[in-house]
Amino acid sequence: MKKIVVCTDLNQESIDALKKLKSVIDLKHTHVDFIHVFEIRMYNADLVPVIYPTEDLYPSIEKSALGILNNLSNDLGLRVEQSTQHCFFSYSREERIKSFLEQTHCDLVVVATRGKHGIAGFFSSSLADFLCKYSPCSVLVLRP
C-alpha cells in the first residue's frame, strides 16, 4: 500500500487545488496522511513578548483544522481507514513537516501552491520550494 502525505495551509485556494488530486493519482490502494502545521509566532508588544496562539487555544484550533482535513478526505472519496488527519503546532512549519515525512517513511508528499506571480512569486520562501529541496521522498506540487 502506497503512503501519501498531503500538506495544506487550509486556505480555500489550496483546498480547491488539492481536491483535484483524485484526478491525478489513483487513491484506491493508498493511505493518506493529511497534515496542517499551525505556526506559533512570537510578537513584541510594548517590549513584552507575546506568543500566539496560546496553549489554551490549541484544542479549538485543532478541532477546526481536523474538521477541514476530514472534509477534504471525504471530497477525495477516501474511506475512514484510508486516511489520517493531523494538526501540529510548531515554531517552524517546514522543519515539523520534514520531521513527519522522515518518521512516516512516505512514498509521496503532495502540496498545493497559491500561484503567486510578479514580485510575490520572485522570492522562494514557500513550503513547496522547501519540500522540493529537502523532502526525503518524491514531491507532487499542485498549482491552482
Image (spheres, helix red, strand yellow):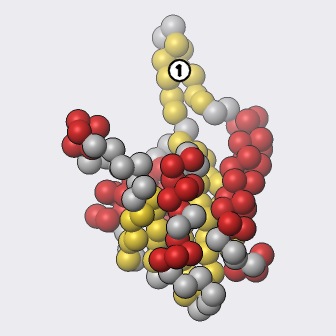
| Corner quadrant of residue 80 | bottom right
Q: Is residue 20 above or below residue 39?
A: below
Q: Is residue 81 left or right of residue 24?
A: right
Q: Position of residue 45 (x, y in %)?
A: 52, 13
Q: Nearer the viewer, residue 130 or 141?
A: 141
Residue 16: quarter of image: bottom right
**46 in relation to 13, above or below:** above
Residue 85 seen in this snapshot: no
Provide the secondary structure element on which disc 1 rests: strand
75 on left or right of 9: right
Question: Which residue is under mark 1?
Answer: 49
Q: Residue at x 69, y 53 (%)?
A: 68
Query: In terms of depth relative to the viewer, which is nearer, 58 or 28?
Result: 28
Tell me what residue is drawn at x 57 percent, y 47 percent. Answer: 12
In the visual, does 56 lie left or right of 144? Answer: right
Three-letter residue code for mark 1? Pro
Q: Residue at x 77, y 41 (%)?
A: 60
Give x and y (percent) for residue 90. 55, 47
Does residue 140 lie above or below 44 as drawn? below
Q: Is residue 140 visible?
A: yes
Say which quadrant the N terminus sits in: bottom right
Residue at x-position 52% and y-position 33%: 41
Badge 1 crowding class, 10 Å Cα cut-off, few under 14, some 14 to 19, many 20 or more, is few
- Horizontally, residue 105 falls left or right of residue 62, namely left
Q: Quadrant of the C terminus?
A: bottom left
* Relative image position of residue 127 (x, y in whole percent): 39, 53
**Total marks drawn?**
1
Measured as percent of width and height from the top left, residue 58 is found at 72, 41
